[in-house]
Amino acid sequence: MQERIKATYRIWGNDVLAVAEAIRIEQTIEFPFDLAEKWIQEEVVGWVENITDSKKGWSDVTITYDLGTVGGELPQLLNVLWGNSSMLPGVRLVDVELPQSLLKSFKGPRFGIEGLRRLLNAPERGLVGTALKPMGSSPAQLAKMAYTIASAGFDTIKDDHSLVNQPWAPWHQRVDAIASAVKEANEKFGTNCLYAPSLNLPADEILDAAREAKRLGAGSVMVLPGIAGFDAMRMIAEAEDIALPVMGHPSLLGSFVTPQQHGLAHHVVFGTLMRIAGADISIFPNFGGRFSFTPEECLQITGTARQPMGNMNPMWVSPAGGMTLDRVEEMLNYYGRDTAALVGGALHRGDLYENSRALKEIIHNH
Amino acid sequence: MQERIKATYRIWGNDVLAVAEAIRIEQTIEFPFDLAEKWIQEEVVGWVENITDSKKGWSDVTITYDLGTVGGELPQLLNVLWGNSSMLPGVRLVDVELPQSLLKSFKGPRFGIEGLRRLLNAPERGLVGTALKPMGSSPAQLAKMAYTIASAGFDTIKDDHSLVNQPWAPWHQRVDAIASAVKEANEKFGTNCLYAPSLNLPADEILDAAREAKRLGAGSVMVLPGIAGFDAMRMIAEAEDIALPVMGHPSLLGSFVTPQQHGLAHHVVFGTLMRIAGADISIFPNFGGRFSFTPEECLQITGTARQPMGNMNPMWVSPAGGMTLDRVEEMLNYYGRDTAALVGGALHRGDLYENSRALKEIIHNH
């Protein structure tokens, strides 16, 4: 039997059957069912495979789709899974299973967990990372900051996701200065700290900017798929002339996961989609920080990041968002060592170098 | 005094002041406020300008942002308005006002209401449009359908948004066949029906596909900014070598507007953002159809589509989603004649040509 795409929707309310019927049509032919040719009714329209009981006020409805509906492309996969159903209240896409033959269409994380471990000479430990901020700082200030942090032995230094082409630090000037500073530290200390500029740039510039970032010496790039689109991240991750580790940032993606009784499950967005789209590191807000993700949601993301998925490399998780040094130990215990720690503002309270060293020690000694 | 970007957030709960403070920092410096330089605290961090009373369980908080935070680019505008705040529950961006000096960075709708009226020789009336479906149909079937509908005097014929590179009708073959059929009808009947292929394609192909669509004779293109990103739509709309009318489709955007007490107001997404990103026609689900938009939300979208906004052309609204012929009169009364009617599946119940003529007559005689 041919493999199919499997999507499970949680549907609230008393009309579960009618909504399930609407979804399997809406996500495919979007056309009066009775007017479609018989083979289209049978093959192109989704199949309702299972409906759980609704004692809790909702049912989980599993719908499978023919591979042909997607045509092997990520934008259309998003369309089939969630496109127009995004406008139906009381529906949440809680799980997705993609068949091997579709997964083959996507390369996934180029480096993944093992690839970054080799690149960073970190065979077992967690990764030590931070973000450069605040906005308003000059390229020279940010470069100095990056040098200090790289000197302390960090693995990754990313731009704050909001740093793009502000007048205080235009993209090219800033990326050049920071990449040079990190390179200098790497040469001096024999390290391989990866600097990831934010690629939150216009659609007609983003791919060239990734190339330019590499030319300027950046060892990684960060993409915001909620703004650029997941497929723009895939494009950058798969480009052979770039071939840098990719960080995926959650900006705007909160709208897909945060609402109750709507949207997509956290692990679908920050696990499945990030990984298919080629993120080597998936950044999301840790529980107990500034945002609202629960410990269970964070753990589900982690599960999806690491589970077998075709031939795709497993992906690093990077729980972030207001993390402090005193929570790092707890994080590593909770998520395990395949975790890319990301501590931002907290490093700046007191001496930046000392705090950075302290964070590195916690992670290296865990 | 320098112009600023004005965003109004509706905040539910008892912590309005704390959440407002969090947003103005999160959306800009994302850094401990007390550790930022004084000028950054004062100039780069957002300003809370107004807080309404909270008798209803929520307050509207107006925050303004320095233009420098955005740097004149749409991806970063999205980031400042909603980026990380998308992960805060109980917060909704209910209004946005952009200053002239920022609006100048975007061209907006190339044709807009008047431009499409000239192109279609329709000085006063509403536009008559449909979508080609169902998925599974062959290029020849879709082309025949398009010819029939164009012969009936339609202004616009778009692909169903889900038609991309399915094996049953691969993109190039399909667009070629349909564009030729519509061209043939236009030549025979002296009309100027615009065919809009769906550009729900990979990020590395979308711009070239728009060019290829034009070369194949398509008179318009349709973009899905919820999947491709709003800035990809802007890129295509602004490309001088394409210069075709652009339709914006709501796929995936439901996640931004549908949830209660979260997300962005309907008129911000389908009015402000669609228009800034260059949609000549903004498609959204009409009230009373298959989806959940209310009459008020639809009217607010319409207001924002047509209100003065820098030098930008006003934009057509296209309320769709399960529309039938017997609702068209009501729609035109409700939205006025600057409405691009979109009736899909309902045209196929009975004789396609007769139904298409009937729809055309209703709109031309209104």
Image: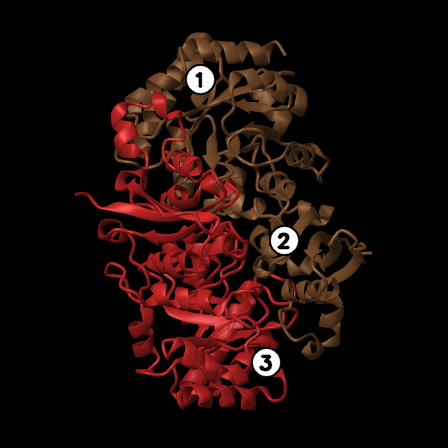
Chain colours: A red, B brown
Gap in angstroms between the C-alphas marked 3 and 2:
30 Å
- Local crowd size for mark 2, using a 10 Å CA cut-off: few (<14), some (14–19), many (≥20): some
Q: Position of residue A325 (x, y in %)?
A: 53, 84
Q: Quadrant of the N terminus of chain A?
A: top left
Q: Which mark is residue B347?
A: 1
Task: Kindly give the residue lying farthest to the left in the view shown.
Answer: A1
Helix, strand or loop for disc 2 = loop
Q: Is there a contact, CB below 8 Å, between mark 2 and mark 1?
A: no
Closer to the eye: label 1 or 3: 1
Q: Amino acid at mark 2?
A: Gly
The answer, for residue B186, to whether it is visible in the render is no
Helix, strand or loop for disc 1 = helix
Q: Which mark is residue B72?
A: 2
In this rendering, the answer to whether B183 lies above or below B3 is above
Q: Nearer the viewer, residue B43 or B60?
A: B60
Q: Position of residue B86 (x, y in %)?
A: 58, 57
Chain assignment, label 3: A
Helix, strand or loop for disc 3 = helix
In this rendering, the answer to whether A202 lies above or below A312 is above
Residue at image location 35% in from the left, 52% down from the top = A96
Q: Amino acid at mark 3?
A: Ala
Q: Position of residue B337 (x, y in %)?
A: 65, 20
Task: Kindly give the residue lying farthest to the front in the view shown.
Answer: A55
Gap in angstroms between the C-alphas marked 1 and 3:
61 Å
Closer to the eye: label 2 or 1: 1
Chain assignment, label 2: B
Residue at image location 52% in from the left, 86% down from the top = A356
In this rendering, the answer to whether A280 lies above or below A253 is below
Chain assignment, label 1: B
- Find disc 3 in the rendering and name its residue: A346
- Local crowd size for mark 3, using a 10 Å CA cut-off: few (<14), some (14–19), many (≥20): some
